[in-house]
Amino acid sequence: LRFFVGRGWSKDQAAGIVGNLVGESRMNVHALNPRDGRDGSDSIGLAQWNGPRAVALKAFAASRGAPVTDFETQLAFVDHELRTSEGAAGDKLRASSTVEQAAAAFVGYERPQGWTAENPTAAHNFSGRLGHARRLAQTGMDANSAGVLADARAVVVFDRAAEEIIKASIVAANRLLPEGQELVVHKNNSDGK
């Protein structure tokens, strides 16, 4: 939160930003979702940038002499985009006066599956994003503080455990199917996890 508050955003606005980033990538600068972009490009980093925005992030990092995976560089790029190429989202965020409004405004910066300008709360995992934002606003913690980071790590562990259970279930189910038939499960969410 301190980073964005230091850039002039209110505490609730900063919580809306960081809560969404936790929901989007679990604050992982190395997050990578291959071919997740609408154009088939990889989604990378804290905000899961893809296509021209991922190219712009890489150029921004290079201009700072920093690797694209540098935490502060990615935060600075979010702030930079909110004031330039993503100014419409930045304007909505600046106009917000509650953490709920800020979370809904910032999800327009990320535009995940389900998002529309008319109904930003329909965005993928909006309730999780808002929950993280509310916790940050109430506690004043940064995302790397124990509460939110522990939640994000728990989600990662749960995701991995659930994936292993699903894989084992598929193997067991395939043993029971007649020869030549196979059970196939497709992932159906925006981050492919």
Image (tube, rainbow, N blue to C red):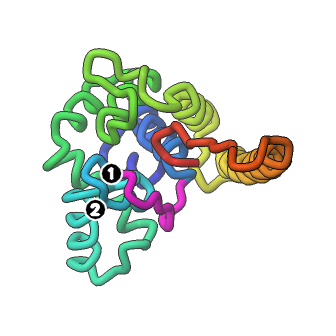
Q: Residue at x 52, y 48 (%)?
A: 192
Quarter of the image for residue 89 reads top left
Q: In the picture provided, is 102 more to the left or to the right than 22?
A: left
Q: With respect to residue 187, does 40 lie above or below?
A: below
Dot 1 lies on which element? loop
Dot 2 lies on which element? helix
Q: Residue at x 45, y 36 (%)?
A: 11
The image position of residue 116, as x and y in percent, is 29, 24
The image position of residue 175, as x and y in percent, is 84, 49
Q: Which of 32 and 82 lies nearest the eye of the viewer?
A: 32
Q: Which of 144 and 45 lies nearest the eye of the viewer?
A: 45
Find disc 1 in the rendering and name its residue: 37
Q: Residue at x 30, y 45 (%)?
A: 8
Mark 2 or mark 1: name the one nearer the start of the chain.
1
Q: Which stretch appears magenta?
A: 27-37
Q: With respect to residue 41, does 147 lie above or below?
A: above
The image position of residue 36, as x and y in percent, is 39, 52
Q: Is residue 147 visible?
A: no
The amino acid beneath tag 1 is: Gly
Circles 2, 1 touching at the beta carbon (< 8 Å): yes
The amino acid beneath tag 2 is: Ala
